[in-house]
Amino acid sequence: MSFVPPESSQPVSDWLSGLRLDQYCPAFQEAGLGTLWECQDLSSAQLQRMGVALPGHRKRILGSLRKLLPSEAGMEEDEEREEDRPVARERTKFRASLIYQHRWVKLDAEYLRYFDTEKDVYSKRIIPTVSITGVVNVGEQKFEVVTHNRTFLFRAECDSERSEWVTVLKSCVRATSLDVTFNPCVSYEMRGYLELRGLRSKLYTVVCADKVFLYKNAEEYRLGIGITSIDMNVGNVKEVDRRAFDLTTPYRIFSFVADTDQLKDQWVEAMRNSIAEALSNYEVAERIWAEPSNQMCADCSAAKPEWAAINLAVVFCKRCAGEHRGLGPSISKVRSLKMDKKVWTEDLIQLFLALGNERANQFWAANVPPSEALTLNSSSEERRRFITAKYREGKYRRYHPLFGNQRELNNALCINVQSSDVCETLALVFCGAEVSCDTGDPELASPIALAQHHGQNLQVEFLTQNRNTEVKVSIDRVHYMAPPSVTHNGFLFKTASMARPITEKKGKEEFSRRWCVLNDGNFSYYESDKNATPNGGLKMKEIVCLAVNPPETHGYDHTFELYSDAERLYLFGTDNPETMREWVKSIAKSFIPAAAEDLLLKDFERIGRLRYKDRLNREMSRLGWFCLVGSSLHIRLEEHTTDETIDLQKLLELSIQPENEVLVLVERGRTLYIEGERKLDFQGWAAAIQRAAGSTGDTLSQQQLTEADIPVIVERCIHFTTQYGLTSEGIYRKSGVNSKIAALLEEFRRDARCVWLKEGEHQVDDVSNVLKRFFRDIEEGLFGQAADSWLSATEESSRICQYRLLFSNLPRVNQATLRALVNHLYCVQRFADLNQMTLHNLAIVFGPTLFQADGQDYSAGRVIEDLIQHYVTIFDVNEQQLQKQLDEITYIIKLRDNLTPKAGTGSGDFICTVYLEEKKETAEQHVKIPATMTAAELTFEILDRRKITVKEKDYWCCFEVNEKEELERPLHCQEKVLPIFHSLGTDSHLLVKKHFSMEAMLVYLASKVEVSKHGMMKFREERSLLGLSTGSFNDRYFILTSTSLRLYKEIRVRVSLFLPLPLPLQSNRPEREWPVKCLKVYQGIKRKLRPPTCWGLTVFYENEKQEKQERQYLCCDTQNEMREWFATFMSIQSGGRVWPAEWLKSRAANHSVPLDARFGNVSLIPLRGSENEMRNSVAAFTADPLAVSLISQSQPGSANHTANHTALCSQTQ
Ligand SMILES: [Zn+2]
């Protein structure tokens, strides 16, 4: 680049008149030469052509030009003696054209410098970037750098370079305008004139921190524009003689002469101090470099980087620092490890050790394509492009799973800053979490406050450094994917894209032949392979799901569907399976990130990305890559290194929450919520998962299975028959109603998990025949391929051994199923006196069924007979357990016999577990609850059982307690218990205990004339069911009247003589209003919501149609306040009868009336399986009069009965 001295803008006319050659002014004007600068290219021949005929005139003009233009600030002469040593230098921005004085120009974060040559260490000019106030384009290839008091004119080699310079310089101006830490004028240790040997004039020398600056004179020092600076970390000062001393550097020896001895001593001391400081500045660097990854530039890998972005937590080299500075401090706060000593607090240093280049780059440079990565030799242009992409655009960052979900990002940040995981905080913040988001906690209102509170200094440091950082959060999924460059092309048949799922078969005529090209992350389709313009296409980053249809779904044998994030569905087809496979492979490969590439190896029918939550992470949904293969759902989380697999056939529950569009998958020990981020692909996934969770085929192992690997259908049928069929004469022999059997079988096939067999609804003979039909039809049969070996085991003496061997060779599912079935049949024949099904009879029925034989001979029957007869031996059965099982069955049968005549009397009753005073096993009470039972009756039932006498002012109450939500509600004494019990979740229970606030509430209510209440409460709302809360607690004004609860955001106070509280003006409409009768008020607020006080109420609202549910959290300042609100709610909801005195009396009168069933510790609620299974069982029980009446007939006080459903079910295991 060329440098032009300030004189160059001098008008030609002035100059010419100075030369006394103004007669040529018109000629110059005609030639378009207005300023001296524009004349620089003039040659003698040109002047001649312009009409400067006299050689003397031409000489005078050219001589003057040479004199004026080439000379810069007059330093070239001064510097002539510099000893140039070969030193590896950075490459220039660009070289200037030959016409101008070449200057090697360097721009870094602090200075714009130019040198004689690329190799020079010490510049001819050093202009602090802070002093640059403007950069202006002036004509072709030229630009001016404006400082406070001086303008420098440069000329670049071409326009593009010029604009590049201008852009960078301008960004310097922007960047430095806020930051003046580099101004060398600010502080100095010593300054004054020193003679530099070999120069005619003295130089104004300034020792400033760890550098020595040389200025031409004091005036230039004042202006901030110097000659050069000498880094003192490489310096050494040597006294030479009285007034002379040398400053030695590896590149040059500066021989100074001071004016006096005394001054020399001062100079030497100042420079030595400066060296000491420079060296001490390396202390920070050395400490930062203690982390090995910090010893290399985070961007280009240059060694010993001395610069850092204190907000990004990366260390980089000087050259990269320049580009960082170009980003501006809102993106990268560039500081020197050496010079900005004050910045480097202990916490910041520790932060850099905790994060550092390696860990920071795991985030910032997670997806750098090799073609874009920097090397030591990368040009400034490459550096700028890379560093801008990396930090400003976040192009290579590892996207946080919550990216794009602001609320959850913030939430996650608030949680994470309480831990020491600064890496996660970095990821969250640079994926958009707001550093100053609302934590919902007024006392620790910001993440910084939270971190401080938890003593997380590094978190505080990081957050503080990033308070004003700009983060690009617009979704740019190309970067997110970093798709491998997959190229593929060929003909495919395509239908028009759709916005809805394809439900019908698409005939061939609906497809058009298209030339399809997959290239560079784009999928395009053309009219033909000759066309250059595509008819359409989609970017790989837009694809959210790829689904492969079963063959022959449509007119073309092989079809696949692509789902875009813009809710479009594209259907492609071909008749060639090979073509299809290629395309599916290529497309999947180009939109599935490398981290999830294991999924690509699977023979999937559907692959794509979905958001999900699980029990551990219900707060935040995560991004997962899902892939469905048969009945296995493989999941890969971005940050996980292995796949997880869910066996869909073994799910305990699978349901869709339509309003939230959430697919709930419950398996043992975990619940997965798959969110419908988009409708179209979610529908596809939901249907496919539901299909896959059903029976996928006709073999035993393809059925929906229980955890014990028994087909659900088998288990349910056996269970039902055990309960209701063991006394049924000719069970398994009598045929049921064919149509009903077929229908039930079909129901099981569709989704066995949803079939709940109920007495009354289902007949024993139908169910038993379903079981038989199932075994008869099952592909490969229960005995599998070895069926013949079973049948041919004829030798009496060795049969049992052979069976044992054959059994051990069966597949897992067959083993479990056979064992369960034979156990069942064993039990059936033990009750042959009741059901007439002897061993032999059962064998006749089940032999041909299980061997799928025609029953011509008894060989099959004999095997079954053997299996049942030698059940204990063949299956290694614990005889004690078997006996227990049989006892239990006997007990059931006895009960059933007893109650049969009175069946139905107890219908609607229910047994439930109620706790006394606290939830623990010894406090468990099992109470039969008739539909009419009130909370008061239940309370007294429990108290009576435990012989607890009620004293005066003992307010015993039945509470509904929800442990998970951390809240409770005293039931009103006249509230019916049964519906409450049915509505309880699995983490809720009923508890009888004293209500200690009742007295205070009654006193408060007695003092009130009218039951209503007004006042401020802190309010927070939650509308979603999935635990996504909104906002934080805010002050709101509430009015509770006999009909409604109203919420006001603002209150304009109307002073009333009669009302002690400010009331909203009539015109002031409530922001919200809820009818009191639709509210259920609980004491307590779950801690996770961080209620501002511990006196909170949780209010559930459900509208009358039960279609809308909300919950509100109200927080009071004092316990008293809360009591009053609660009492008011209770009073309104009970019609003023919060604690009716008369029922105590009535209770006394009715004391002798038996509450008809007491069962001690007999639990007859099925307690097996998961929570969900239990819930379902409970639900099934409510509609099951037998189950209930069975209990109601057991004898009071028979507390020693051990029958329970755990045992009832165990026979199938
Ligand atoms: Zn670098």
Image (cartoon, rainbow, N blue to C red):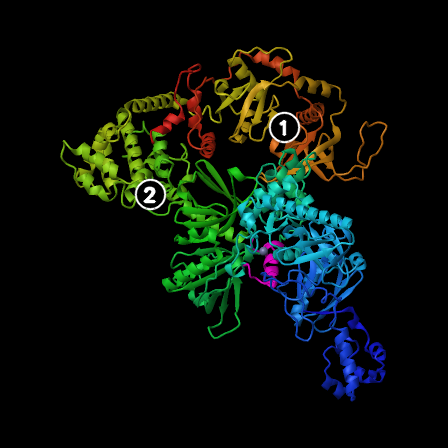
The location of residue 1122, given as percent across then percent down, is 69, 26
Which residue is found at the position 79% from the left and 36% from the top?
1051
Crowd class of label 1 (few under 14; some 14 to 19; many from 20; radius 10 Å): many
- The residue tagged 1 is 1084
Q: Quadrant of ligand 1?
A: bottom right
When asked about the image quadrant of residue 650, the answer is: top left
Q: Nearer the viewer, residue 897 or 753?
A: 753
Q: Secondary structure at mark 1?
A: loop
Image quadrant holding the C terminus, namely top left
Say whether residue 1154 is left or right of residue 1132. Answer: left
Residue 1048 sits above or below residue 264 on the image:
above
When asked about the image quadrant of residue 464, the answer is: top right
**Would residue 1177 be visible to someone looking at this image?**
yes
The location of residue 1129, given as percent across then percent down, is 68, 27
Image quadrant holding the N terminus, namely bottom right
Specify the amino acid type for callout 2. Answer: Ser
Query: Over which residues does the magenta segment extend?
Result: 374-396
Specify the amino acid type for callout 1. Answer: Gly
Q: Are marks 2 and 1 in contact (CB under 8 Å)?
A: no
Which residue is found at the position 47% from the left and 75% from the top?
530
Q: Nearer the viewer, residue 695 or 215?
A: 215
- The residue tagged 2 is 701
Say whether residue 981 is left or right of residue 436. Answer: left
Say whether residue 1110 is left or right of residue 539. Answer: right
**Would residue 677 be visible to someone looking at this image?**
no
Residue 346 sits above or below residue 697 on the image:
above
